Image (cartoon, rainbow, N blue to C red):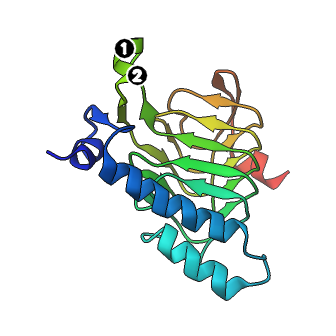
Amino acid sequence: MTEKEKMLAGQWYNANFDTALIEERAIVKDLCLELNLTRMHELTRRRKILREILPNVDAEAVEILSPFMVDYGYNVYLGAGTFFNHNCYLMDCAEIQIGKKVFVGPNCGFYTAIHPLDSVKRAEGLERAEPIEIGDDVWIGGDVTILPGVKIGRGTVIGAKSLVTKDIPENVMAFGNPCRVVKKIGLETLLV
């Protein structure tokens, strides 16, 4: 198996010294730089670049403010109506699936990579990745960090500055470090 095949299979792989993965990251990071240097009113150009960065996303159906960064791009799936505020980073070594009409605040990080605790193995460049899944109609506040393997259910609100280490169910408000559910969001909450 290639290192990329191992990465996509969720196995331990060499992230730091595999030339093919290094080249893939370099290409997409150059595209992210190009996007981030493109004026917001140059919508046609921004969408063209976004299609190159995120081949599995309908660039016309989402809004992404700069700066924005990914590691590979092809592991990102965004539903229609999704919005990313400034300075978001998607470490997409595994799939990051984000539903429709998801609002992501500024300075958010979605991290799929897991590194060995053993410093020798870590120095060898080993890592593995677990996917992140966000349901439809989720609101993620500013400065939120989402860790590998996390699923957030539809309709949920994650408060600003939260560190999401475990799955969060649908239709709840959750926040904190670590992030925890503080209340259920029901119809009466939505009408207020």
**Residue located 56% across and 73% down the image:** 50
**Residue located 39% across and 56% down the image:** 23
Q: Name the residue under label 2.
A: 123
Image coordinates for residue 98, horizontal then vertical, percent: 52, 56
Image mark count: 2
**Residue located 62% across and 42% down the image:** 109
Image coordinates for residue 177, horizontal then vertical, percent: 69, 21
Q: What residue type is labelled 2?
A: Ala
Compared across the picture, whether 126 is left or right of 66 comes to left
Q: Mark 1 points at which residue?
A: 120
Question: Which type of secondary structure does the marked residue at label 2 adopt?
Answer: helix
Image coordinates for residue 77, horizontal then vertical, percent: 46, 61
Residue positioned most to the left: 1
Instruction: Indicate which disc residue 165 carries.
Output: none
Taking depth in this image into account, of 152 and 146 the one nearest to the observer is 146
**164 to 141, vertically: above or below:** above
Image coordinates for residue 151, horizontal then vertical, percent: 48, 40
Q: In which quarter of the image is the N terminus?
A: top left
Residue positioned most to the right: 192
